[in-house]
Image (spheres, rainbow, N blue to C red):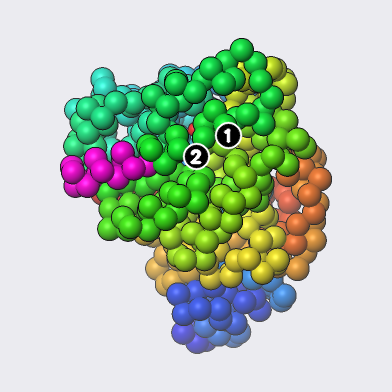
Amino acid sequence: MTESAETYDLILRGAEVLTPNGRQACDVAVSGGRIAGLGDFGGARAAMTLDLEGLTVLPGVIDTQVHFREPGLEHKEDLESGTRAAALGGVVAVFEMPNTKPSTLDAAALEDKLARARGRAWTDHAFFMGSAAENAEALGELERLPGCCGVKIFMGSSTGSLLVEDDETLREVLRCGHRRVAVHCEDEDRLRERLELVRDGADVAMHPEWRDAETALRATRRLLRLSREVGRRVHVLHVTTAEEVTELARHRDIATCEVTPQHLTLAAPECYERLGTLAQMNPPIREARHRAGLWEGVNQGLFDVVGSDHAPHTLEEKGGDYPRTPSGMPGVQTLLPLLLDHHAAGRLTLERLVDLTSAGAQRLYGLVGKGRIAVGYDADFTIVDLKARREITGAWLASKSGWSPFEGMTVTGWPIFTILRGNIVMREDELQSTPIGEPLRFQDTLQPDV
Ligand code: DOR
């Protein structure tokens, strides 16, 4: 599109833009919260023009795995602070997990979360429905409620009480519903058998011994077998082993998968020596051999998304004695800076970064109007400076938990603007205006409002 007499709400000018055509030097015009056109808008009028010489415009980053703890555990995080951290980190939308207090297991709990987010969320959002024996039959209906991104299964116990441990219940949950199901794969029987390794107290470096590679692989294999038997598509969250990468490559027709920035960045035993229980998460950070396997999964096009698994706990909680310390680390705000740093180091192309942080989420979950810089799509942009060198500091972090395993690290590449439906939400590390986040829309929702 070229010059027009129309007046736009916003024009992004002078940047390199990651469009479906590839990397393009072009302007982007925005009208009514949507992308009105890509091209030369040099002569067009706009209420606001951003001159972005030297910057790069990415599709708005979507984080498909965060734990924001509201309701019930707001001393760790809440929907306002979690989405604030997200927006400061360049994230425009989040999918939030059901292991809150109470767990999200029915329509009322989902409606409660949507109501709590209204007027307080800095990003767009959707919520996972938790699965358990008691709500299995209802899941087919529940997963299609507006504002729900799908069902989450915990095969191994982690933070909270949600658990689907035996094959019978797992089969039942997989049978009830059609959307892709997100699964935490750790085998509960094996976790119980091996608990004696750490039960009476141990060094946190034992965490990947207790919850070993076989624990993850066994659960992933069981899930793949049952999902094939039942004919249900699944999404394996936070893959951690080289063996699962190989296994998942054989099941691309039914399974998609996620990797986290922390599993791509940290490695045992060094992370436990340096960070102690701050490095404790489920499934665990493992040795460099597994990290190399995960990078192979990135390079081979195996992984569909990067999710942060933002799982905040306070420093006081993390300061207890292992294994009673809670598992999880915050990450929604550092997801993009870490990936940009991997890009700067030559480990990740910008095109693959875009695939993992926006296009993948759209493809997997059937998001409506998001994940792509294309005419008619929501005007969601994460505008980055690929060359900026910045330190991740405590002062910059917005999570209530107040810490990051990456504090003190200097990265190359930084988010400069977060733009949500044409509105500037973050500019140069400062939030702008008020929280305008809305529920995300999906193709499979029962009452589509499109
Ligand atoms: O380390 C983790 N923490 N893994 C999970 O699966 C849950 C999460 C949390 O909610 O704390």
Quarter of the image holding residue 275?
top right
Indicate the position of residue 278 as horizontal and vertical percent values.
69, 32
Q: Nearer the viewer, residue 284 or 60?
A: 284
Please tell me whether the stretch drawn in magenta is mainly helix, strand or loop: helix
Q: Is residue 52 above or below residue 388?
A: below
Q: Residues within 10 Å of mark 1 (few under 14, many from 20)?
A: many
Quarter of the image holding residue 126?
top left
| Mark 1 CB within 8 Å of ligand 1 | no
Residue at point 69%, 39% (across, down): 269
Would residue 267 be visible to someone looking at this image? Answer: yes
Q: Is residue 327 above or below residue 43?
A: above
What amino acid does circle 1 point to? Pro
Q: Which residue is identified by label 2?
A: 213
Contact flag, marks 1 and 2 (Cβ < 8 Å): yes
Q: Nearer the viewer, residue 421 or 411?
A: 411
Q: Which residue is identified by label 1?
A: 208
SS of the residue under disc 2: helix
> Which residue range is magenta in the image?
220-232
Indicate the position of residue 321 as horizontal and vertical percent values.
69, 17
Indicate the position of residue 434 as horizontal and vertical percent values.
61, 43
Residue at point 62%, 77% (across, down): 16
Q: Is residue 397 above or below residue 383?
A: above
CA distance for labels 1 and 2: 8 Å
**How many numbered circles are shown?**
2
What amino acid does circle 2 point to? Ala
Would residue 398 be visible to someone looking at this image? Answer: no
Q: Nearer the viewer, residue 93 or 193?
A: 193
In the image, taking residue 435 as reference, residue 135 lies left or right, namely: left
| Mark 2 CB within 8 Å of ligand 1 | no
Indicate the position of residue 298 as horizontal and vertical percent values.
51, 61
Residue at point 72%, 21% (across, down): 319
